[in-house]
Image (cartoon, coloured by chain):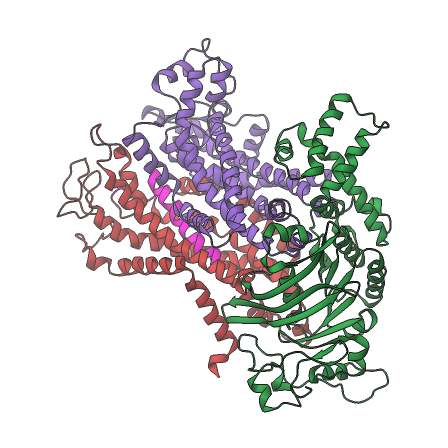
Chain colours: A purple, B green, C red
Amino acid sequence: MAVFISRRLIFLVFVMFGVSFIIFGLQMTFSPERRAMVFVTTPQQSKNIPVLIKKYGFDQPFYKQYFTWLKEVSKGHLGYSLVASDSVWRAFLRYFPITLELTLFASPCIILFGVWLGTKAGQKSNTAVDHFTRIFSIVGWSLPTFLFSLVLLMIFYGYFRIFPPGVLGDELSMLVYGNTSEFIRYTGMFTVDGILNGRLDVTLEALKHLVLPVLTECVVICALLMRVMRSGMLEEMSKDYVITARAKGVDKQTTILKHARRNALIPVITVAGQLVAALMEGAIAVEIIFNRKGIGWWMASSAIQLDMPVLMSMCLFFAIVFVTANLIVDIIYAYIDPRIRLS
Amino acid sequence: MSTLIEIKDLVTNFYTYEGVVKALNKISLEVKKGSTFGLVGESGCGKSVLVRSIMRIVQSPGVIEGGQVLFHKKKNGKEVVVDLLQQSEEYMRSIRGSDISMIFQEPNAALNPILSIGYQVSESFLFHVAEEMCEKILDELNSPNDHTFFPIKQFLKYTYRVGSSDSKAFVLKLFKKIPFLKKWDKRLKKEALKRSVEIIDKLHVPDPEQTVKSYPHNLSGGMKQRIVIAMALACNPDLLIADEATSNLDVTVQAQILELLNELKKEVISSILLITHDLGVVAETCERVGVMYAGSLCEVGDVNEIFKDPKHPYTKALLRSVPLFSNEGKLESIEGTVPNLVNPPTGCRFHPRCSLVMEQCKQEAPELKEVGPNHTVACFAVN
Amino acid sequence: MLENHPRLKELRYTLYRIFRNPSAIIGVILLLFFICIAVFAPYIAPPKDLDRPYMMPRAGYTITPQPPNEKNIFGTTEGQYDIFYGIIWGTRTAFRIGLFVITTAVIIGVILGTLAGYFGGKVDEIIMRLVDVVFAIPFLVLAMAIVVSFGRGLDIIMIAIASIAWRSYPRVIRSAILSVREQDFVQAAKTMGVSDIRIMWRHIIPNSIYPVMVIAFMEAGSVVLTAAFMSFLGLGAPKGYSDWGQMVALARNYIVGPADDPLKFWYTIIIPGGAIVLFVLAWALIGDALRDAFDPKIRRK
């Protein structure tokens, strides 16, 4: 077990180096002038470009710049984000909870709904449930997240006037973002902070604004999950030990849940890493459309405005998330499948 | 000896892309109590389909289309004859594993790799004798030696009292959903595990205590097959169906398993329906044998009779093709190939390969007719 | 008899399995429909400016989109770009993106996977680690980073996506090679003196083609989705170009209309969006049907 984890951690370090190397390499395609331009906001300042180049070392050879950057990162200096007008680290702490909130609300829905429907579809092939699941999967796959969000917004906000975009309504936004003594942002997630501050109206308002984003994420990711779950179940239902269980007189429900599904979950968990990645990607689209300033939005804005320190740091962050997710997946594997525990 | 199970005119068809596979063509046979019946035939002749039809676990696209399966079941001391094909799924579920059990060819595949051996054997007990076990635990709780903490004891007494009359009671299921109460069946599981250890031990598996804690991949092929047999015998079934149970084991292990089955027949089971393509196994272990070909029965009779004096051309050819130590020369084989059951030959399904074929054989399918004591043959040339 | 040749029979059976699936039929019809539009684009929507046929013509310069009318069958977007024209020529754009990216990705991925599986050892290690690293970053994030580095434009997007999309294929090919390599019939062929390349060609490629095809079809769709999103963000085609994602971007300010008629500008979103969805759906349906057709467990019942 310990061997497992340490191997994974080494892998993480390796991946982080690889990722940062690639991203840094991309950054190097900019000429030193162009990179200095990012810090320039007025024509007068453009005279300072050579100074900036010297200051940030843009004219140094690749490896030197890379090492400088590594040094800075290890000290915790991730740079300055123009988009956020704040240090990358502090901006991250501000934006991350918004995305986390979305993920935390979306994940249980996705898991419950996806696993449940996928199981039902796999066990009753060629019935209505099965067809619905297949159609849902395919359509969900074909639907671009951003488009789905737009349409939802159009219908629910435009037409029905409920579920507005944004994180909170105007009034409460002023309250939570402004004065810090009245409302303390413990976690940065407004649903939680509302309760912690004794302001249930904040929580409810935040929930109202979460409905559409969570719905979007759910539909898109469930489509993936359902498909894998269904195919896993289909395979399991024809396995010998499932027939043996039936021949032993085990009732239908136990056969399906204990014998078939537990085995079917193994391939599902394998794609869990992919699902997490899809969740992150979906967050980018959702945050832009629904105007929620989380890390997805931050990333996209940084890309458009060429805010390189942010891009670098976010790539690192995503790599960490990905490898951690895989680590958790492996641990769950070992828990479910005894064959893996010993090897 | 009286009948245990009687199959009459069983028809099973499979609806596939290539057409309708007529797998079972009006099969009729009878297994008596306390006997071992061997069912032989080439691969694909329908032996497995037959036994799965009996237990009604035929996989789609297979459908049982006709006939009767009359099972003589002991109920409360009296004997009742039940047509298994007419019963509900829930009834069949209660029969499977407790009155009629089946063991399969691949012990590796028959055991779920992610569940412990102990759990898998316990399942047999938990699904069939749960009420009896609950009663036993209730007695234990009521005895003066039991020192469980009072409130817990009352609660457990309640749950096990309910369980002893109906293990599937709604209340008990409800309790399973509530965090602390769901542990009520711990004793039940322990009892089931205890019985599992006992039965595994009966099957001569070394170190049963340790075995129940381990997983299928920890065991060898022979051990796994013993576990599979243990699962099947857990509730003392009247009929044990062994579907090529020894075909995948090497010869020494095979011999051990067969001996074990014989031993257990006296104590635990009543009858065995043994499916195999190995005539040697039949000769060793069975009292009666039935020969199947392409979905029909050709000949049924006592083992000695059949081996000494086979009547049906197919049976004769089969026996001839078994190479004897003393023989020399070419290996005998039967001309032709097994027919495609989507378009089986008309009349007698063996006629294209039969040396005694007559006109009548191509028109009608022969029925089983007696040619000797307990010896029936389906062939126009013989009758 | 040619009729009974086993390979042909398998092929017929495969085609039967594919087309028995109603979704496959729908998918193929949709795809053919789009192909026709793409091929006949110049006739269906004649370009005003022959030098730049992909730029949508403008029926004026008013900002607000106009609903469908006689002159502009699907209406116009912000800035009066003709939606109908954009949809027709956008089909060509979509095909360009999809085909270029997938072909490149498959070629790169299959080559790398073959090298890894065939040579094993250090080469295998390096290639697989590289694949792991590329996998570690979400698709979109890396694509954005690349586009940012090299500038905007549809071509850049295509190259950016292609340089990530290859990552799914090496694993598939490599595992197919590894599994086939160990099998008895390969050993037998080797003992008979069959050369390695021939073994690869006759045994390995046919076995690994199917999953590659399935993945390729499904990814064709998602590639177009990613490209559409990046165009939507403004990282792709220039304003007014016939690209469906770009057209949705133009609709951004018109998601919600005036208070009395909030769905007034539905056509600016729904029509280009619908085109995207149907296009991706076509590929996905075919890919799904292929997967079911090739799945050995469901094949023979």
- Of residues A113 and A291, the one drawn nearer to the viewer in this rendering: A113
Query: In percent of the image, x 22 and y 27: which residue is there?
Result: C259
Answer whether residue C107 is visible to the viewer in this image: no
Callout count: 0
Query: In percent of the image, x 68 and y 86: which residue is there?
Result: B383
Question: Residue furthest toward the top?
Answer: A181
Q: Position of residue C230 (x, y in %)?
A: 37, 42
Q: Where is residue C283 in the image (x, y as percent from the top left)?
A: 39, 55
- Quick check: is B240 in the magenta stretch? no
Task: From the viewer's perspective, tell me whether residue A180 is left or right of residue B119.
Answer: left
Query: In percent of the image, x 64 and y 31: which residue is there?
Result: B175
Answer whether residue A317 is visible to the viewer in this image: yes
Query: In percent of the image, x 56 and y 72: which residue is there?
Result: B22
- Of residues A236 and A288, the one drawn nearer to the viewer in this rendering: A236
Quarter of the image where the N terminus of chain B is located: bottom right
Task: From the viewer's perspective, tell me whether residue A78 is left or right of residue B125.
Answer: left
- Of residues A320 and A103, the one drawn nearer to the viewer in this rendering: A103
Q: In this view, does A338 lie above or below B222?
A: above
Residue B312, by quadrant, is bottom right
Q: Position of residue C133 (x, y in %)?
A: 56, 44
Chief secondary structure of the magenta span?
helix
Tell me which segment is drawn in magenta: C214-240
